Image (cartoon, grey):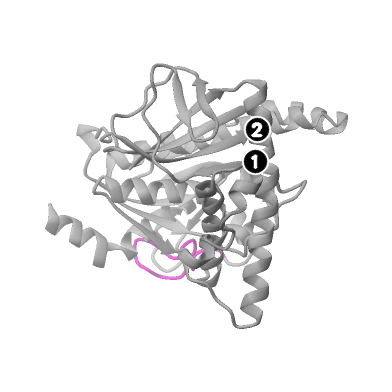
Amino acid sequence: MVQCQIKLCLTRAQEAELDRWLWHFTGVYNWAIRKIGCDAAGGIYYRKRDFQNLLAGHGRKLGIPFHTLQGVLVQVRTASDRCGKRLDKNPRLKGHRNRLNSIPLPDPIKRPDGCRIKVPSIGSIRFHKQDIPDGRIKCGRIIKRASGWYLALSVDAQPNIVRTFKMKAHREVGIDSGYMAIVTLSDGERVDAPKECSAMEKRLTQAQRSGNRKLVEQLHEGIVSRKKDRNHKLSRYLVGTCAVMTFVHDNNQALQQKPGKSVANANIHQLQKMLAYKSSSFGRWFELMDGCWSTRTCSAYGSLAGPKGRHGLSVRRWVSEAYGASHERDIDTARNALISAVGSVVEEARDAA
């Protein structure tokens, strides 16, 4: 399954119709959240099929396809189930500050004819010319962003194969994340944190002070897109060059209490998720390792001899008092992550090869 996004060229009537849908779906979304919460308090629970049919007949009254209305109910039910399994937080009510910005299209969509695609109850919509993978379009989702309207398509096709680099395709590395360097590998390679957002932050501050909400949304979208593009390129490079990857898992939520801006700019959690799904798709080993004591442990002898306390974090190079081994803090942490995985991941990868 491959997802691709195309930018739509809507008429004013089509934009007004989709805005009307979003307004109704916001009420349906909030009603579904309250319905699940109130009924659960009384011991009433619904199966997925029963819950998505609670508003049977309302689509005709609202002038909205009922399958699309069902898609919103399924979205709320899925979010509630993930919260019950402690995989995610409780879904939040939508409003002025937390807007609903997507419309599910659960039915199959016909392949586009030229630069036009047919959407149920909307009709033929023009879009900017773009290559769409060959395959059956199983479903879609209309998304409203500051830069315009988009249609995300789920196509039943095979993803592109990640190109491997011949000279370094069998590397086994530990990865330590940071803020001065986004990642540091156990073999000494570093990827410094780019300053792609620094130029936009000054303009963002000016737009926020002037109260230009539309410009603020556009600048935020640009910053998010640049971070995502950087993480896509970095994860593609790592998956293409490394056969085994062990990533030091830190508590980023706790770290945001102090260097919050640096943590947000690095966007380490997104990089972890990209590495996880790309590794599983292309036959690479990827594991998250607990970062407890990893910065204090000597990777050469395993002794706990590194600097202690919060003030010790400023020490980037240290020497083991017991054995005299010299360490660079980030590289040592990455090596400890790789060493902790030797018993499971590395040996299995070698046996498979």
- Examine the residues drawn in magenta and state their main secondary structure: loop
Please say if 329 is above or below 221: below
Q: Nearer the viewer, residue 86 or 284?
A: 86
Q: Is residue 138 left or right of residue 17?
A: left
Magenta region, residue range:
292-307
Q: Are marks 2 and 1 in contact (CB under 8 Å)?
A: yes
Q: Which residue is mark 1?
A: 21
Going 39% across and 40% down the picture, which residue do you hit? 108
Going 53% across and 55% down the picture, which residue do you hit? 75
Whole-angstrom CA distance, mark 2 to mark 1, is 6 Å
**Picture coordinates of residue 351, whole percent (x, y):** 12, 59
**Picture coordinates of residue 42, whole percent (x, y):** 65, 82
Q: Which residue is mark 2?
A: 17
Going 53% across and 70% down the picture, which residue do you hit? 86
Q: Nearer the viewer, residue 173 or 145?
A: 145
Q: Secondary structure at mark 2?
A: helix
Going 63% across and 34% down the picture, which residue do you hit? 18
Amino acid type assigned to the residue bearing label 2 in the image: Glu
Dividing the picture into quadrants, the one containing residue 13 is: top right
- Binning the other alpha carbons within 10 Å of mark 1 as few (below 14), some (14 to 19) or many (20 upward) gives some
**Picture coordinates of residue 25, whole percent (x, y):** 65, 48
**Residue 277 shows in the view:** yes
Q: Nearer the viewer, residue 353 or 222?
A: 222
Numbered tag placed on residue 265 in the rendering = none
Q: Nearer the viewer, residue 118 or 128?
A: 118
- Binning the other alpha carbons within 10 Å of mark 2 as few (below 14), some (14 to 19) or many (20 upward) gives some
Amino acid type assigned to the residue bearing label 1 in the image: Trp
Would you say residue 11 sits in the magenta stretch?
A: no
**Picture coordinates of residue 294, whole percent (x, y):** 46, 63
Would you say residue 302 sits in the magenta stretch?
A: yes
Please say if 261 is above or below 351: above
Residue sitting farthest toward the right: 210
